[in-house]
Amino acid sequence: MEAIYFFSLLVVLLIVGLLVWLLLIKMREISSELRQLRQDITKIRHSPVITSQSDPAVFITQDEFALPVQAAAPNRSLLSSEVKKQPSKRPGFFERNPDLEKFIGENLINKLGIAVLVLGIGYFVKFAIDQNWINAWGRVLIGFSCGAALLGLAHHLRKQYAAFSSVLVGGGLAVLYFTIALAFHEYQLFSQAIAFILMVAVTGFSVFMSITYDRQELAVLALLGGFASPLLASSGGNNYLVLFIYILILNIGMLILAYFKKWPVITFISYVATIILFAGWLVAKAMGEPQAPYLGGFIFAMLFYLVFFAMTVVYNLKQQQPFNFLEISILLSNTIFFYLCGLYLLNQLAVGTYLGLFSGVMAFVNGLVFWQLKQQLNDDPKLRLLLGGLGGMLLYLAILFELTYKLSSTTIEMRAIKYLIIASYHYLFAILIFRFLPAGTATRWPLREILLGLSFGSYILLVQPIVEDARNAYLLQPSGSILPFVLHYLALFLLLALLYYAFTYYRQAIGLRTKRMNNFLWFGCSALVYLVSIEADHVLALIQYKSGQNLKNLLQQQHKIYFPILWGLASFGFMLLGMRYKLKTLRLVSLSLFFITLLKLFLFDIQNISAGGRIAAFISLGVLLLIVSFLYQKLKILLLDDTPPEK
């Protein structure tokens, strides 16, 4: 009974298919009639209006003379400019599909129908297999026949029903892919190589159809099937060479397609699928394995990087079009992903040996492309800035890796020298960024402010502890060397040069009396006071320390005596500069530092300070405060003439 039931179901499906075929023929006839009607209406609308050979004349009578005046013709340029509409935003779903019934009937039902049809064919073939009606080769031939039938029907309907034919092509390709996969996995009718070749042939055929029909969705289906082929034809082995060669060939094909067509979704799908497959192999098959093919993985990663770089830029450079956000994101993430994978793979081959060379080569490649684009007059500035920034950052990392792995760190002194040299290199690179970073970048992103904050914060948290250890090692150990301590003056000089360069940039770019300059003055004055205080601490320790003394107690005593005097002098200097250049911010910094100094002196230092130190601190601060008050009284007319800060 079940056999009779399923044969009856097959007959019903055939009858329904025949009715659908007749309905499609009738719809094609109606569509051709509608197309002819539209053409006739278009001809009527664009047919010229028959007018008289000459425009009517208007006669103006003045006294006894009648002068013929030609009627003024309308200004067509003005009319055309009035008719032009402003570009509108992309309409929403319901605006693009006001007739929901039409959308469901023409667009949604065909996709659901092809999915249901494929499932129905699959269930019927499965039932026939379970009942042993069809042997293995028969089952495979049924699958190939169904796929070919869908592709043939799609080819027949490609002109009248483009969207419907694309859906049929997708269904036919899906049937072919899964038929080959079942023949390989379930029935072992094909070897792995033959199954793989058949899937490659199906992918190539689908790419050919997408180019011939000029349909992006067909290219997407071909690409998805192409990336699914290795998984469908996989036997569970670890043959990465065949997998990556196939993916490389597929991506080269997409690169050729990208040269002729601007289909960004193709580039995006290829890029994401390649990253997933490569990262999956790297995590599952390579990481933690001592004998993993790291060199081969690095070579394929480099080839993928070059292919996607070319795939993203080739069409825009050929057509001289600007790059959008997606393309810039792919270029940036492509470089970052390849760089991180390259660092890991090369580090597994030889720890730290090739990292600097690898970073330098990547910097050279990005810099070379940047230089080539700069020679063009109509290049995209976004791409040029991206490549220039990547090249500079990679060059910085190349030198950093060389310093990190080439400098010796066997002893404590050599380790301190190494870290101080690296810190000096950081500050030198920051100065170069201030010099060569385009001025317009600061208006969009606060890169310079972030750079200043990181540089000064790294000096406080990282460099200063190393300097203190080097100083204490020289003072407390008989065989201590002063070289690491002296070397820190190079980092200090570069940090001060960075602050000075930042001040000159802000003064020239945004002016002295702006909010950003005021913020920088507060930051710069605070940084100067901190650096001067720390360096005075080092100098006093080197001068006054004697063997056997408690260095910590000595420094605490010097803080109570010399810091108030030093801060008072700094406040006085800020006040003089603020009065000289009419900068209210500097004068406020001076007064704030005076107030902090007095609080420190009266609340913390006055009880434990020596008599001589107490006298020196009070007298010096008193004299400085009186001088400041005198200058305020003498220059009050000039000070009241401050220009308010610009916004």
Image: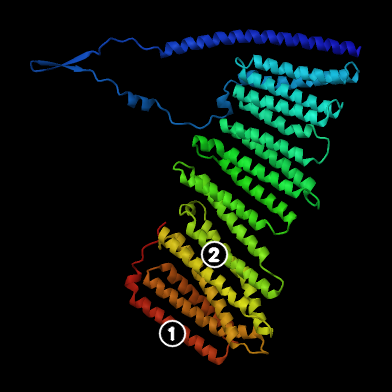
Q: Measuring 55% from the left and 35% from the top, which residue is drawn there?
A: 315
Residue 632 percent location from the top left of the image = 37, 76
Foreground: 517 or 50? 50
Disc 1 target residue: 623
Foreground: 119 or 187? 187
Q: Nearer the viewer, mark 1 or mark 2?
A: 2
41, above or below 476, in the image: above
Tell me the quarter of the picture where residue 189 sits.
top right
Tell me the quarter of the picture where residue 396 sits.
bottom right
Residue 104 appears in view: no
Q: Measuring 87% from the left and 21% from the top, which residue is drawn there?
A: 136
Q: Measuring 65% from the left and 14% from the top, which residue is drawn there?
A: 156
Crowdedness of circle 1 by 10 Å Cα count: few (<14), some, many (20+)?
Answer: few
Image color mode: rainbow
| In the displayed structure image, the side of residue 81 where residue 10 appears, left or right | right
- The residue under label 2 is which amino acid type? Leu
Name the residue furthest bottom.
611
Q: Quadrant of the C terminus?
A: bottom left
Name the residue furthest left.
64
Residue 31 percent location from the top left of the image = 58, 11
| Sequence order check, earlier mark of 1 and 2 | 2
* SS of the residue under disc 2: helix
Disc 2 target residue: 428
- The residue under label 1 is which amino acid type? Val
| In the displayed structure image, the side of residue 134 where residue 642 appears, left or right | left
* SS of the residue under disc 1: helix
The dot on residue 131 is none
Residue 519 percent location from the top left of the image = 48, 63
